[in-house]
Image: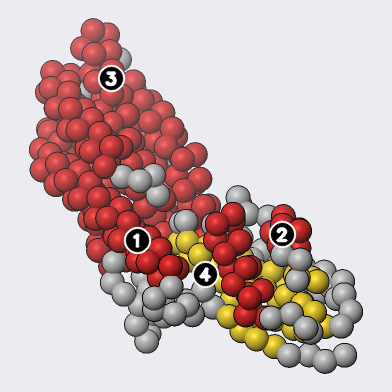
Amino acid sequence: MSHTEHHSSSGTSGSNSPHDHEGEHSHDHSLEVTDKNARAVAWAGLLIAGFMFAELIGGWLAGSLALMADAIHMVTDAASLGLAWWAFQQSKKPADARLTYGRDRLPVLIAFANAIFLLVVTIWICVEAVGRLMEPQTVLAGPMFIIAVLGLLVNIGAFLILQHGGDGSLNMRSAILHVLGDLLGSVAAIAAAVIIYFTGWYPIDPILSVFVALLIVRSAVTVMRQSAHILLEGAPAQIDREVIRKDLLAEIPELRDVYHIHLWSLAEGKVNATMHAAVSAEDNSSVVVQKMRTRLKAVHGIGHVTIELSSHSEPVSTPLDASSTVSDTG
């Protein structure tokens, strides 16, 4: 039985091939989306940064934990949106000798960091609220109400900018999550101010602060888990290796087997893959590779694939990953 091996990458097409034009169009679209995301987080960040100092000072003067918690949210939001903007700018830079895949994964890393920031802020709010419940403090309902309403308007504006100006990526979702936490914090502060004004029951301030903090925990954990999965090079949830294998074998007659399939996301929407494929000795390996690449891109959304071909006179009948004795996540 003779064996020949051939390596093919998705970037090996000739300069005049249709795939190059398609790649250029995809690259231009990606840059357009990145610029759109960057503009959205920049405007939202400036809007929030312009108001956060007023709310922080106002919350301290009014003695309101709800306002101060919302202001601290705004501080972290302004920093997080700044990091998100920086990540989008960096991701536009081309690959180089040190970062051969480019900086596409940087926005995912920032999303992970932002989720951690949210959890830290939530813990701080809960600890502070326990102290306020044990020793209630006087809150000036009037100033608290005015500042909370202004904060709500600012947060609504920032939320709408991000909601309509972004593409739903992890980095955008983490930014929206920060602003949504602020928006809910402003609503809670307004409710607390109204209750304190009419009833004088001060514990409502820390109680609503904890309620708002807990509302964002689940979403923060979700963003953190999803971004961590990409950073750990986990397989995309929407792509099944066995489905890919069966589809390739069914659609490409020259293939005798496909195995050692590994999938991972370089960033959201950018799936990479490596795999081994067995073909008959008499088949044209370059034609088989091209068919596989075309099928993987068109049907499974895998834009970059490295394929190792082996010529066999008999079927291979090899499992997906015969070399691994542990669970494979990528």
Q: How would you rate the neighbour count of disc 2 (Cα within 10 Å): few for under 14, some for 14-19, many for 20 or more?
A: few
Distance from Cα at disc 1 to Cα at disc 2:
27 Å
Distance from Cα at disc 1 to Cα at disc 3:
52 Å
* First along the sequence among labels 1 and 4: 1
**Which residue is identified by label 1?**
25
Amino acid at circle 2 = Glu
| Vertical relation: 106 (above or below) 206 | below
Amino acid at circle 1 = His
Is residue 196 rendered to the left or right of residue 143?
Answer: right
**Which residue is identified by label 2?**
251
Q: How would you rate the neighbour count of disc 4 (Cα within 10 Å): few for under 14, some for 14-19, many for 20 or more?
A: some
* First along the sequence among labels 4 and 3: 3
Distance from Cα at disc 1 to Cα at disc 4:
16 Å
Q: Quadrant of the C terminus?
A: bottom right
**Which residue is identified by label 3?**
192
Q: Quadrant of the N terminus?
A: bottom right
